[in-house]
Image (spheres, rainbow, N blue to C red):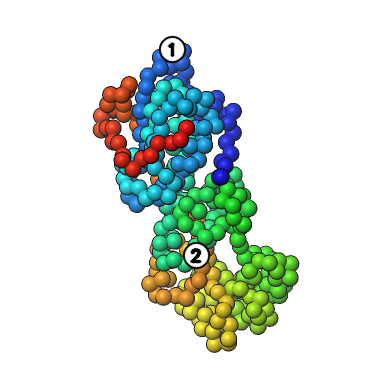
Amino acid sequence: MIKFYFPTAKIRRGDYSDVYFNRARKILIDDNYHPILTLQVFQKQKNITLCGIEETKQLFRQTIDSISQLKIHALKDGHQISSWETVLTIEGDYSYFAHLETVYLGIFARRSLIATNIHNAVVAANGKPVLYFAPRFDYFLNQEGDGYAALIGGASGVSTPAAASLINQKPVGTIPHALIVAYHGDTAKTAIKFNQYFPEINTISLIDFNNNCVKGALESAKKLGKKLWGVRLDTAENIADISTPQQTGVNPLLVKKVRQALDNNGYNWVKIIVSGGFNPEKIKQFELTKTPVDIYAVGSSIFSGKIDFTADAVRLNGKNLAKTGRKYSPNPRLKPWPI
């Protein structure tokens, strides 16, 4: 079972809550007033991959002593949701859960953004694996939950042990450019060393170091033979490879030239992985041009955009009551949580 970690004591006392929720809770408790409120959670965009339900469920279980007195209904992680669709309802004594609103809305916003962006990349890739190489672009303590969100979105692998820890996977990755520097810029030798010390892991040679991907691919294949599982292209967006002087970055023509060179020299088993500035739009363009990519790796684009969730109080003691412009919107797709 996936288990999320929470700083329970801090959450219970409201350290991560907007102060007005803490004050609202204190007013109700001190006034000995226990209204039964129904809150519904939604967001306003189309075609969103929902994520954060399981994490929120565990948040409630770990921080609310009287959770058995709440009635909670929700969708599941991975559901595709539409604008204004209710994804979660909470009914019960508002003083039990008022302080958690900031926390669970933030969970939904963060995890759904990553799951949605990964999902869009996976759809664009037409069934080819998409690897989540984004942790380096964000705060490190986000990695565990983000790795789970990437899995919900359809990622085939994640790059750090922390990101992989909740999803029972091993992290995946290739070779950093710095290691090639350490071996005097020798791409093939670096791949050989990788294979020597990690023979159980697929050897993928990083071939753009000397800005000649065709040469790097052929040298690696010649020296490693069947030990070479794949090659990765990561040419910077402002640099043109020797093979494609009129086009910068990792582009379809460059990939095709690498594939052709490998195939023409008998290395047709070698897979091609691409990275560097890939997002759903770029992946879609590669697929439209039938670029022979086997695996896509995505990074900072996974954090682009925003998905804001809102919680509205829409019922009081079983009767509809909401602020102007909002209303109780029951969703038949919601299922009760087992408390």
Residue at the limit of the structure toward the front, as seen here: 338
Q: Position of residue 305 (x, y in %)?
A: 42, 50
From the viewer's perspective, is residue 175 above or below residue 322?
Answer: below
Specify whether residue 30 is in view. Answer: yes
Name which residue lies at 58% across and 48% down. 166
Specify whether residue 220 is in view. Answer: no
Q: Position of residue 192 (x, y in %)?
A: 71, 74
Residue at the limit of the structure toward the left, as seen here: 325
Q: Secondary structure at mark 1?
A: loop
Name which residue lies at 49% across and 62% down. 130
Label 2 packing within 10 angstroms: few (<14), some (14-19), many (20+): some
Q: Position of residue 171 (x, y in %)?
A: 61, 57
Q: Amino acid at mark 2?
A: Pro
Q: Quadrant of the N terminus?
A: top right
Residue at numbered disc 2: 129
Residue at numbered disc 1: 32
Q: Amino acid at mark 1?
A: Asn
Q: How many marks?
A: 2
Nearest the camera: 32 or 234?
A: 32
From the viewer's perspective, is residue 287 above or below residue 77?
Answer: below
Label 1 packing within 10 angstroms: few (<14), some (14-19), many (20+): few
Name which residue lies at 37% across and 34% down. 89
Q: Position of residue 146 (x, y in %)?
A: 53, 48
From the viewer's perspective, is residue 151 above or below residue 174?
Answer: above
